[in-house]
Image: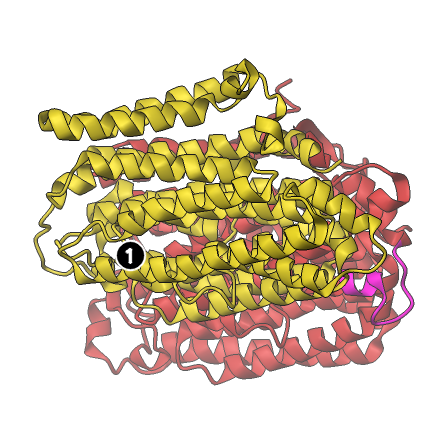
Chain colours: A red, B yellow
Amino acid sequence: MFESSLLSFLTLGPAVAAVVLLLLPDRKPAMHRWIALGVSVAGFLLSLILWFRFDADNPGFQFVEQISWIPQFGISYHVGVDGISLLLVLLTTLLVPVVILASWTSIDRHVKAFHIALMLLTTGMLGAFVALDLFLFYIFWELMLIPMYFIIGVWGGPRRIYAAVKFVLFTMAGSLFMLLAILYMAWFAHSEVGIWTYDYISLAAIAPQLEMTGLWSPQALVFLAFALAFAIKVPMFPFHTWLPDAHVEAPTGGSIILAGVLLKLGTYGFIRFNRAMLPDAWDYFVPLIMVLAVIGIIYGALVALVQPDIKKLVAYSSVSHMGYVMLGLAAGTVASTEGAVLQMISHGLSTGALFLLVGVVYERRHTRLISDYGGIAGVVPVYTGVFLLVTLSSIGLPGLNGFIGEFLILAGTWQVAPMAAVFAGLGIILGAVYMLWMFQRVFWNPLVHEENRSLSDMNLRELLAVLPLLVLIVWIGIHPTTFLSPVEAAVRALLGS
Amino acid sequence: MPTMTDLAAVAPEIILTLTAGLLLLVEAFAPGLRRSASLITVIAALVAAWSRLAFALPGEVWGGMLSIDRVAAYVDLYILVALVLTAAMAGPYLRRNDCERGEFYTLLLLATVGAMVMASSVDALSLFLGLELLSIPLYVLNAYLRKTAVSVEAGLKYFVVGAFASAFVVYGIALLYGVTGTTNLVAMGRSVVAADAVSPLLAVGLAMVVGALGFKLALVPFHAWAPDVYQGSPTPVTAFLSVVPKGAALVALLRLVDGMDLLHVSPNWVVVASVIAVASMTLGNVVAIVQRDVKRMLAYSGIAHMGYAMVAVIVAGREGGSAVLVYLAAYTLMNIGAFATLALMSERENEPTLMSDLAGQGWIRPVAAAALTLCLVSLAGVPPLFGFTGKFVVFRAAVNNGFVWLAVVGVINSLISAFYYLRVVYMMYMQPLPRREPVFQPSWLITGVATIAAVGVLILGIYPVPILDAAHEAILDLVR
């Protein structure tokens, strides 16, 4: 009983917490912070039970719960996790308390509303990772939209309105076509087997029979409709233009969630729907995905190189890093796919930590321009050390998390598409250049701005927020097997090998 | 002589009509009691709803003039819900504007009876009767704030356009009668199907009737009255106007499409109706973007929403028909909720509903702003809200019946609409509060109406099964 509704507690708990927060008076911001923190930490602990009771050898979905919801259309509340979604669920439940801690003092207006939005967002993210019904998936997918609109639009930077509207319109543009594709798939399944269902497992069995003869055949169009939704979210070149705006304007907590979890929903969608349900169309479009992924890697890195704003630099580095994930998926070997999944986690940790750290100095100096810093290594030694570790993780230093994912991806890709691997390898070099150059200009160059002399180092709360990320960054780097073993069975099932 | 069955079948209409008369008497002889007129109306509507549920649904009554079937019952219930919510918010609204009179509710009740008659008509004559009984009180209600120029303008505009529509209907019916020799819609359909070729007179007659319904639905190209009328009318009247006539007209259209078998009468029907649907969706949404007045914006959004509903009408059959019914229910709740919050938030006498007047309201009127947000986001079709359910069933019906391209146009339009709905949300939460003291105290009753509508939108969005069931059952009586 407990085990079968564990995922529901985890997913719907934050939504219930949001309602509770709504009903509490908004005079006491501290109370709302503590309640939200308590709920999110409880969520993380619950997800640990998930982790320990997960059977790594079973490639299927576990902790499954299914309840009939809208029987007229064959829609049910159906949730479950496999190895891939398990890791993403854990990443999400880990990052939410981090976000609350990181926003503890920087969110000082409308504290209650912020935490309500964050809790609803959490339900949306976790729900999308665990949903095994396409209708349910769509509901959770769209549920993330409005809270994120508020988080960017209310607590964001100077151009927050533009960024928030752009985020919503881009996301909706993709997801509405996905809705049509879902409807079409259900209709197709009905015409094939005579029952109405939106269930993932049933549809995944039927969808490969969709006719695939060329660009205008049903399977290709359904594929493109899903791919558009996910490519915008990833974001793949050329659908990435919302990302720098949203990341830069969002408050620190919003950026962590965006980079840490929301982008992963795009790549997760590619794995779960495009790759698993529409194999023929996947094969047809793989060259295109690979090319766009490599363009994204190089382009993101080059644009990051010239950014004067640290946050924008990190935002563009996301475009580059997510390109690796897409490359790994497109290459389609076991190694590259496992690498892609691990890279999703790694990127969530590293980039989440980077945004958090940028937020730390921003809160003190209210500027994110690289040129406003310089030489602060001596002033804030702890901060410098932490930042260095995260930077090295982001550029893929062996022994830290970024290396494992990128190595697996490149090794796997080399087997099927050596040229792509070569260009992607170029991206790693560029990644080292822009990150280290930024690090040098912020921390090492001579200290020219007097204001920076009085910069205070990270306090306990900030250290506490970043600590779990640092632990995992090192852990994945030293012992990736811990995290690869639950993924392996699911990846092999996905690739049919 | 009407039989007992006939009388029992129209019990709700009788109750509402008697109440309408009673309120006139109250106004004449006991004006002190006028404060309770709103409450009496609400009670009458609830009793009417109860009687609709309590008495059996006999099907065709009054010699084949009305069909009190499950479709009629479904639409009646949602019209009555609209009446309850409108009457509840009208009380405080009218008191605030210092013009509460019993006649207001009398007119509201009569319009409701008209809508109910229209929705259950299976005869061209009762259809016309219902249409007039619905329209004439509304002309007066639109101009109810007679000291306000825009209100009078709204009444006059709606009257002129409505008179045109009525003339169209009468002339169309005359032509149909001339061709088929009957006024009964089903009999008309039978004789049309029996005849080999479609007479051009029949096509003209049908086009006129459908066009007149298009006026009531504010479909392009019959939409031009909507923005001015919405903007000028007292807000509770706008709420009523935006849902009740549209519901009645949509059901009348469904009865026409299925009863007359329009697909059979003319293959051009689908083409023409598709053009109307696409034009309504697109024009409504695109023009709504540039509106500065929220009521005007909602008028254009209403045009677009009727375009979505038309998609389901085109699909027809059981799937399309039940989609229309579900969409109506969703549209009613969202719209009434939105207008109720506007009535709540307007701060000055002359009804400012400019978007900029909503700046910062999110933080000083959290309940009202949250209700408006829910209703608008639902209108944009974001799950898990009722508006999404409506769009889902409509698009699903379109995809399942080979109208994928209409669904594609529909989703592109949903995207456009998100832009302007969210702009209101942006105004409320992301703009600083202007320094201005509110003139009106927020009324708990209007807050209640807005909250009920918003909570309804949320709950029915999460669990739409009862409405889906009811719509599915109801449509079985219409589509045989």
Q: Position of residue B12 (x, y in %)?
A: 44, 24
Instruction: Identify which residue is drawn at 20% across, 61% down.
Output: B432
The secondary element bearing badge 1 is classed as helix
Quarter of the image where one finds residue B321? top right
Question: Where B314 falls versus A449 (above or below)?
Answer: above
Instruction: Identify which residue is drawn at 63% across, 75% down.
Output: A237
Chain at tag 1: B
Q: Position of residue A180 (x, y in %)?
A: 69, 56
Pick the front one: B298 or A87 = B298
Magenta segment, prevailing SS (helix, strand or loop): loop
Q: Position of residue A88 (x, y in %)?
A: 62, 47
Pick the front one: A57 or A155 = A155
**From this viewpoint, is residue B369 visible?**
no
Q: Residues within 10 Å of mark 1 (few under 14, many from 20)?
A: many
**On the picture, is A292 further left or further right than A396?**
right
**On the picture, is A343 further left or further right than B148?**
right
Q: Position of residue A228 (x, y in %)?
A: 66, 65
Instruction: Identify which residue is drawn at 68% across, 31% down.
Output: B477
**From this viewpoint, is residue A320 visible?**
yes
Quarter of the image where one finds residue B56? top right
Q: How many marks?
A: 1
Magenta segment includes A10: no
What quarter of the picture does the C terminus of chain B occupy?
top right
Quarter of the image where one finds residue B171? bottom right
Question: Where B264 falls versus B88 (above or below)?
Answer: below
The segment highlighted magenta reads: A210-222
- Residue placed under numbered mark 1 in the picture: B155
Magenta segment includes A213: yes
Q: Label 1 amino acid?
A: Gly
Pick the front one: A44 or A285 = A285
Question: Where A296 falls versus A70 (above or below)?
Answer: below
